[in-house]
Amino acid sequence: MLLNIKNLHLEIGGKEIIKGLNLGINKGEVHAIMGPNGTGKSTLAAAITGREGYDVTKGEIVYKGIDILEMPPEDRAKEGIFLSFQYPVEIPGVSMTNFMRTAMNEHLEYQGKNPIPATDFLKRMDEKKKIVEIHSKLTNRSVNEGFSGGEKKKNEIFQMAMLEPTLSILDETDSGLDIDALRIVANGVNTLKTSENAFIIITHYQRLLDYIEPDFVHVLYDGQIVKSGGKDLAIELEEKGYDWIKQENENY
Amino acid sequence: MMEYTKPNVLKKHLTDLFEESKVSVFSKDKDYISALRTEAIAQFDKKGFPSGKDESWRGTDLKKVLSKGYQQFLHPQNQDIDLSKLFICEVHNFDTDILSLLNGWMVNGYARLKTFENGTIIGSLAEAMEEYPELINEYYNKSDKINEHSFSSLNTAFAIDGVFIYVPDGVQVDRAIQMVSIINHDENLLVQNRNLIILGNNSSLTFVQCDDSTNKLTSLNNSVTEFFIGENSNLDHTKLQNLNNKSTLINSTYINQDANSNVSTNAISLNGGLIRNNINVALNGQGSNANVYGLYLMDDKQHIDNRVYIDHKVANCTSSELFKGILDDEASGIFNGHIMVRKDAQNTNAFQNNNNILLKDTATIDTLPFLEIYADDVKCSHGATIGQLDLEAMFYLRSRGISEDNARMLLMYAFATEVINNISIDPLRERIDDMVKKRLRGELSICDTCVLHCGSPEKEVHFDIDLSKI
Ligand SMILES: Nc1ncnc2c1ncn2[C@@H]1O[C@H](COP(=O)(O)OP(=O)(O)O)[C@@H](O)[C@H]1O
Ligand SMILES: [Mg+2]
């Protein structure tokens, strides 16, 4: 199993947000995680990628056979974990090229390889930009600074394409996108999908799942996965909303 | 070596030294200089060194610095130093003329004055005092406010040498002039060099002023530079300060601007035990513009004090200030920006910004904006921030595989780059850029040669590329 989350409990500032979550993912699979706002989807993504300030009180996150809870975020990234942020961060003064080249070279160094020569790097940038139809010159732009909402999301997928992760988590990459941008992002993901990698698609809407076919759909509610199923579950959620999930769980 | 215990003792030593020198070294002075010295030492004697009670020195404690004994050379020294090694400048493509000062004295080819065909005069101030008394009489010590600062008075009393530049009307000096002031001595040293730069009307000059030390010993450098900028003239001034942790630098810069002149002055403080930059800008002529920038990167127990006074005396002038600093460890800093807008200075635009990053909670910064406005048609703004590195940005970078150290470096560098980008000469900016990166990584050493030859430029860093240039 590529990722195995076992009985995960997590607190932020003393408040329990994830309350005993189990999730197993194999290579080649696409998992969709759906659920109402504030149920802990982004928190789960943060826990997998190693953001600080989240106290795991119980359980483990096993990735490629090792518990990664103590691993710093950069090492998780170099082991192939990638997060497309729900809210990509603007970093004035750090150019996209310096950012990406630094990241790439750190990955290469981790793999015991030589840094990528400048010309190869530029070629790779151009190639990967095409996947998400970024036409503007990224070279002298600061990371996400002044990017439109759509550009920011495309930029996340562009970075994913550059770094070729094994496990990609897309946190509401679809929200705020018009239909064109949505198609571009989805195409990007489909291009990058292989039998050797896996995706977690966090979304509210079934819309994105029309373009990226999930193998499994999970409903996250109040810090737990309360329902799992196939693609049909996403359609059912779209039709019925989340109220029935809430009711089912509150009746317990 | 002389050891003292109180600033008063140092003061007494200096006033005594002055009396002795009056009949020896200073006896050859022209009357004008001689009168200035006498007046200045009296002012210094009356005011003494600034103390903690002095409002304009609040937050900067000189007690320790002034409790030491210092030796001051009143003659040039013939040291056993290979000067050609000390003053190598290796900025590629940087077309520059270098004026070298060793312990406050002009050395090398410019020890005498050079007068160029177009009338430009460049060289030693000591020589200029002899050869161009009319210019000296007209400009020397004529800066606004210069007699109000006791350190400047002390400088006026003792100054003998430094850089002198005169650019006549209508002359554009193509090559940048670089002044490298190096302190290298095996005893506590007091250096008081004095620079006078005069631009006529419709002329321009790029002037780079480097203050360095080449060893680890104690020094006190009380340096004064006066600029007179004629109508429609342009000055591009960069100060580069890279001194050891036992160095104290009191750098006073007086800029006097005539109508429609443009000045950009940039103080890059990379290292130094205690650095005080006094920057006085007098906008005397309508339509003049001053950009005053600064970057300071302090750690350990270093102290930086930037004090900017911009005097809008007449209408239709603009000034903008941007000072940015990163302070680590127990470093401390002061930014004091005083904007004066006089009654007649209508249609004034004056902007001021001071942004700081404190890397540890033991580091401190005091930022004190002070707007004093007597005109009514004025656009003035000031802003100050004190913060840490953006944690969201840190996580974003690290989530892409960038180590914590490199992520921090990228963010610090990004913060600093806004100031560096204001340096207009490409090769110089690139070199300073490189030095700033090295400084942020803790790899910048006090140079063993010229400041622009610090460290090892051939060593490449991960993010040390600007692919937009390829
Ligand atoms: N940094 C934080 N500090 C405090 N509470 C937080 C923080 N991040 C998330 N939360 C809380 O955790 C819960 C889950 O948030 P989140 O994971 O963002 O939900 P989702 O992504 O499912 O909309 C919410 O109640 C939210 O208020
Ligand atoms: Mg969320």
Image: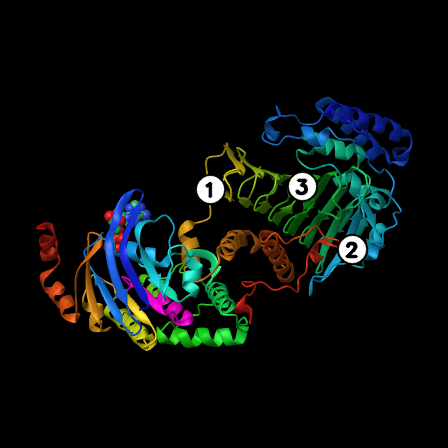
Asked if labels 2 and 1 touch by Cβ distance under 8 angstroms, the answer is: no
Provide the residue span drawn in magenta: A154-176
- Mark sitting on residue A175: none
Quadrant location of residue A128? bottom left
Q: From the image, tell me which residue sits under label 2.
A: B87
Dot 1 amino acid type: Thr
Q: Which mark is residue B253?
A: 3
Q: Give a yes or no on whether discs 1 and 2 share a subunit.
A: yes
Task: Tell me which amino acid carries mark 2.
Answer: Phe
Crowding around mark 3 (Cα neighbors within 10 Å: few <14, some 14 to 19, many 20+) is many
* Residue B270 in the image, given as x and y percentages of width and height: 63, 48
Q: Amino acid at mark 3?
A: Thr
Look at the numbered disc 1 and give the secondary structure of its residue: strand
Quote the CA–CA distance across marks 2 and 3.
Answer: 24 Å
Which chain is home to disc 1? Answer: B
With B453 as the anchor, is A4 left or right in this view? Answer: left
Q: For the residue labelled by badge 2, is the local secondary structure a helix, a strand or a loop? A: loop
Foreground residue among B289 and A104: A104
Q: CA distance from mark 1 to mark 3?
A: 25 Å
Q: Residue at x 87, y 36 (%)?
A: B29
State the residue at coordinates (46%, 42%): B385
Q: Is residue B397 left or right of residue B329?
A: left
Residue named by callout 1:
B385
Name the quarter where the N terminus of chain B is drawn.
top right
Tell me if the residue at label 3 has its CB under 8 Å from ligand 1: no
Q: Chain of mark 2?
A: B
Horizontal and vertical percent position of residue B224: 72, 40
